[in-house]
C-alpha cells in the first residue's frame, strides 16, 4: 500500500490496451474526456471516439443504438451526470439489454472541492434497482485496469464506478479480475468489513489499527456490487458474526443495502454502516471531507468498535 | 417494391381496420396517432424501406425504429399486414404473455427494432444506429418515427443536434405532425410552430409533406434518401384518427379505446372505403 493512483487512471490505461485488441470497442464522452481519462483512447483511436457534447441523455440512448449495430460503446461522464440519464439507462440500455458500458468517474467523496452537486453518493442505489445491469467498483488502479477487459467481455450493460482521487494499491499488477467474486484480502475473526472502491484501503488500515486493540478484522473487497457474491458474503459473516460495510455512498441502497438484503435472508446478522448518513456532501479537501463524514479508516474503526460492543 | 397507390390505399385501410379491432379488443391503447400514421407506415414498409419479412433481422436491412411507442398498434398492424407474422396474433395486443406488448419491446416481435414508450429516446437510439452503420461503412438506411408532442422532450433536440453535426445522411426522421398530444393540442400545451424553422436551425434538411398522399409520401422519402449532406426530417402533416370520422382531429382519442358500438361504427366506415 505504498504507492497511490486513481481508479480512473486504471480505466484510461486499460481502455487504450483494449482498443488495440478489440476493434468493436468505441468511446463516447460528455465533454469530460480528460477528466474521465478517456483522452488516451481518443488520441489513439480518433475514428472510434466522439465527444458528444454535454448531453448525457442522448449519449446513453445513442450508445444503445451503437450496441444494436455490434459496437461495444464505453461511455463516460461523472457519476452524478449518469443520474440525469437514468430513464435512458432503464429503457434504452437495461430493458433492451444492450451491450453498453457506462463509465462513471468522480463517484464518492474524493472529488472534494467541487462540492455536493458533483459528488455521486446515490448512484449505486439508482443503478442497483435495474434488471440486467452489472455494477463494478474497483478498489485500486490495477483492479480498474484489469476490470476494463472483463467489462467488455460481459454481455450486457455495465456500470463501472470510478473515483477521481488517488488511493493506495491494495491488489497486484498480476492479479486477474474475476467479476461476481468478492475477495477476502485479509483474514480475521471478530468482525468482517465489506468495502468497495477506495474504502478497501481504508478498511485495511483500520484493520492494522484495530489489531493493536486485539480486535481481529477480516477485510473483503466487494468490487462487484451487482450481481453480488452471496456465498462469500454469507461465509464471512458466519465466521465473524459481526458485519461492517464501508462505501463512499449513501448508507441507503448501496453496497450496505445489497449485503443487508443477502444477510437478512440467509443469515440475519447485526450490521454497521459506514457511508453518507442521509446527507449531501460539501466542498473541502478530500481528506478533510473523509474525516468530517467518517468515510475513512478512523470511521471504520469507530464502527467496528461499536459492533464489538454488541453481542454476536 | 413496386406497388400502386391503390394497393397502398388498400393495405392502409386494412391496417386501420386491424388497429380498431386490436384496441377495441384490448379495451385500451392509443387509436388516434396509430390511425393517423397508417398511410406513412404503409408506404414505408410496402414501398420505401429495404426490408424482408421472411428474414426480419438480416444484416443488410434498413432499420425502422419508433420513438413514440404508444402508436405501437400501427407498427404491429403494418408488420402483420406486410407478412412478418400472422394477423391472427394481432388481437393479443396488451394481453398477458403476448408478444404485442402495450409499448414496443426490442426484438419482442419480428421487425420491432427498439423499445420505446418513454418519449424522447427512440430518436437517440436511431442516431446511434445510423452512426454505428456508417462507422461500419454499411449502406443501410435508418428511419425513425417521432411524434410532434414528443418534440417537447429536450433529448429529441440533443439527438437532432448530434445527427446534423455528424452529417448522418443515412438517417431519415419521420415526424408525425398531427397537432395533438395526450391532453390537448400541441399548440395549446407548448407551441411547436414555427416547427420547420426550428428543425432547420438545428441543421436538419426538412421536407414538409401531406401524410395521406401516397405520391407525395413516396416522393418525400426518395428526396430524403438522395440527400447526402446530412439527416433529413420529413414532417408529415397527418390527421389524428384518420379514416374514422368521429375520431379525427381531436385529442380525445389519443389514448381512448372505442366502445364495442363505436368500434362497430368505425369498422363499418372503414369497410365503406374498400
Image: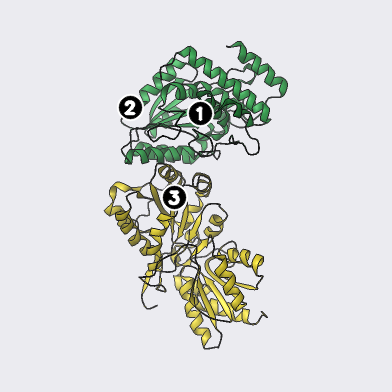
Chain colours: A yellow, B green
Question: Same chain, marks 3 and 2?
Answer: no
Which residue is denoted by mark 3 in the rendering?
A100
Which chain does the residue under circle 3 lie in?
A
What's the mark number on residue B227? 2
A29 and B82: which one is in front? B82
CA gap between label 3 and label 2 equals 31 Å
Q: Quadrant of the C terminus of chain A?
A: bottom right
Within 10 angstroms of label 3, few (less than 14), some, or many (20 or more) residues? many
Q: Is residue A172 above or below residue B109?
A: below
Q: Quadrant of the N terminus of chain A?
A: bottom left
B204 and B34: which one is in front? B34
Which chain does the residue under circle 1 lie in?
B
B102 and A197: which one is in front? B102
Q: Is residue B85 above or below residue B130?
A: above
Within 10 angstroms of label 1, few (less than 14), some, or many (20 or more) residues? many
Question: Same chain, marks 1 and 2?
Answer: yes
CA gap between label 1 and label 2 equals 30 Å
What's the mark number on residue B84? 1
Report the residue at 57% width, 69% height from top: A233
Which chain does the residue under circle 2 lie in?
B
Within 10 angstroms of label 2, few (less than 14), some, or many (20 or more) residues? some
Label 2 residue SS: loop
Q: Of the residues under marks 1 and 2, which one precedes in the sequence?
A: 1
Q: Position of residue A148 (x, y in %)?
A: 39, 59
- Disc nearest the viewer among 3 and 1: 1
Decide: marks 3, 2 in contact (CB < 8 A)? Answer: no
Report the residue at 47% width, 38% height from top: B156
Report the residue at 57% width, 23% height from top: B35
Quarter location, residue A268:
bottom right
Toward the left, the furthest residue is A44
Q: Position of residue A6 (x, y in %)?
A: 38, 67
Q: Position of residue A196 (x, y in %)?
A: 49, 68
Amino acid at each position: 500500500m505504498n504507492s497511490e493512483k486513481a481508479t480512473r487512471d486504471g480505466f484510461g490505461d486499460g481502455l487504450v490496451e483494449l482498443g488495440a485488441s478489440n476493434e468493436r470497442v468505441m468511446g463516447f464522452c460528455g465533454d469530460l474526456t480528460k477528466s474521465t481519462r478517456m483522452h488516451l483512447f481518443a488520441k489513439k483511436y480518433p475514428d472510434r471516439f466522439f465527444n458528444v457534447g454535454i448531453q448525457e441523455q442522448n449519449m446513453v440512448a445513442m450508445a444503445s443504438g451503437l450496441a444494436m449495430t455490434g459496437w461495444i460503446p464505453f461511455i463516460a461522464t461523472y457519476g452524478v451526470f449518469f443520474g440525469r440519464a437514468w430513464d435512458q439507462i432503464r429503457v434504452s440500455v437495461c430493458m433492451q439489454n444492450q451491450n453498453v458500458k457506462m463509465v462513471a468517474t468522480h463517484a464518492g467523496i474524493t472529488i472534494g472541492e467541487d462540492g455536493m452537486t458533483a459528488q455521486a453518493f446515490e448512484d449505486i442505489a439508482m443503478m442497483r434497482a435495474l434488471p440486467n445491469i452489472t455494477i463494478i467498483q474497483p478498489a485500486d488502479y490495477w483492479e480498474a485496469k484489469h476490470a476494463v477487459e472483463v467489462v467488455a467481455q460481459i454481455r450486457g450493460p455495465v456500470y463501472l464506478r470510478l473515483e477521481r482521487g488517488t488511493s493506495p494499491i491494495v491488489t497486484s499488477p498480476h492479479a486477474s479480475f474475476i467479476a461476481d467474486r468478492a475477495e477476502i484480502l485479509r483474514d480475521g475473526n471478530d468482525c468482517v468489513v465489506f468495502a468497495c472502491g477506495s474504502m478497501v484501503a481504508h478498511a485495511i488500515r483500520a484493520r492494522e489499527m484495530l489489531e493493536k486493540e486485539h480486535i481481529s478484522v477480516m477485510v473483503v473487497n466487494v468490487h462487484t456490487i451487482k450481481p453480488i457474491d452471496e456465498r462469500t458474503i454469507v461465509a464471512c459473516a458466519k465466521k465473524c458474526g459481526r458485519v461492517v460495510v464501508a462505501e463512499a455512498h449513501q448508507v441507503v441502497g448501496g453496497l450496505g443495502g445489497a449485503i443487508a438484503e443477502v444477510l437478512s435472508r440467509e443469515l440475519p446478522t447485526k450490521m454497521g454502516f459506514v457511508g453518507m448518513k442521509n446527507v449531501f456532501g460539501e466542498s473541502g479537501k478530500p481528506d478533510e471531507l473523509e474525516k468530517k463524514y467518517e468515510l475513512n479508516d478512523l470511521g471504520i474503526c469507530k464502527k467496528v468498535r461499536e459492533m464489538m460492543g454488541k453481542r454476536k | 417494391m413496386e406497388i400502386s397507390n391503390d394497393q397502398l390505399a388498400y393495405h392502409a385501410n386494412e391496417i386501420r381496420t386491424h388497429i380498431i379491432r386490436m384496441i377495441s379488443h384490448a379495451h385500451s391503447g392509443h387509436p388516434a396517432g396509430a390511425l393517423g400514421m397508417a398511410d406513412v407506415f404503409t408506404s414505408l414498409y410496402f414501398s420505401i424501406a429495404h426490408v424482408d419479412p421472411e428474414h426480419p433481422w438480416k444484416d443488410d436491412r434498413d432499420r425502422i425504429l419508433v420513438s413514440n411507442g404508444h402508436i405501437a398498434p400501427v407498427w404491429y398492424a403494418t408488420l402483420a399486414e406486410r407478412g412478418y407474422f400472422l394477423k391472427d396474433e394481432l388481437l393479443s395486443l396488451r394481453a398477458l404473455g403476448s408478444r404485442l406488448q402495450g409499448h414496443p419491446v426490442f426484438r419482442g416481435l419480428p421487425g420491432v427494432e427498439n423499445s420505446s414508450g418513454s418519449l424522447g429516446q427512440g430518436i437517440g437510439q436511431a442516431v446511434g444506429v445510423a452512426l454505428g452503420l456508417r462507422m461500419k461503412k454499411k449502406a443501410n438506411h435508418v428511419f425513425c418515427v417521432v411524434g410532434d408532442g414528443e418534440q417537447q422532450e429536450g433529448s429529441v433536440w440533443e439527438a437532432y443536434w448530434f445527427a446534423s453535426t455528424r452529417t448522418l445522411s443515412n438517417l431519415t426522421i419521420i415526424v408525425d405532425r398531427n397537432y395533438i398530444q395526450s391532453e390537448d393540442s400541441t399548440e395549446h400545451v407548448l407551441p411547436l410552430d414555427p416547427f420547420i424553422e426550428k428543425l432547420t436551425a438545428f441543421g436538419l434538411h426538412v421536407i414538409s409533406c401531406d401524410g395521406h398522399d401516397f405520391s407525395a409520401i413516396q416522393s418525400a422519402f426518395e428526396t430524403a434518401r438522395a440527400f447526402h449532406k446530412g439527416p433529413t426530417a420529413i414532417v408529415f402533416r397527418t390527421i389524428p384518427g384518420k379514416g374514422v370520422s368521429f375520431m379525427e382531429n381531436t385529442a380525445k382519442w389519443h389514448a381512448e379505446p372505442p366502445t364495442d358500438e363505436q368500434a362497430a361504427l368505425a369498422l363499418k366506415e372503414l369497410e365503406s372505403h374498400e
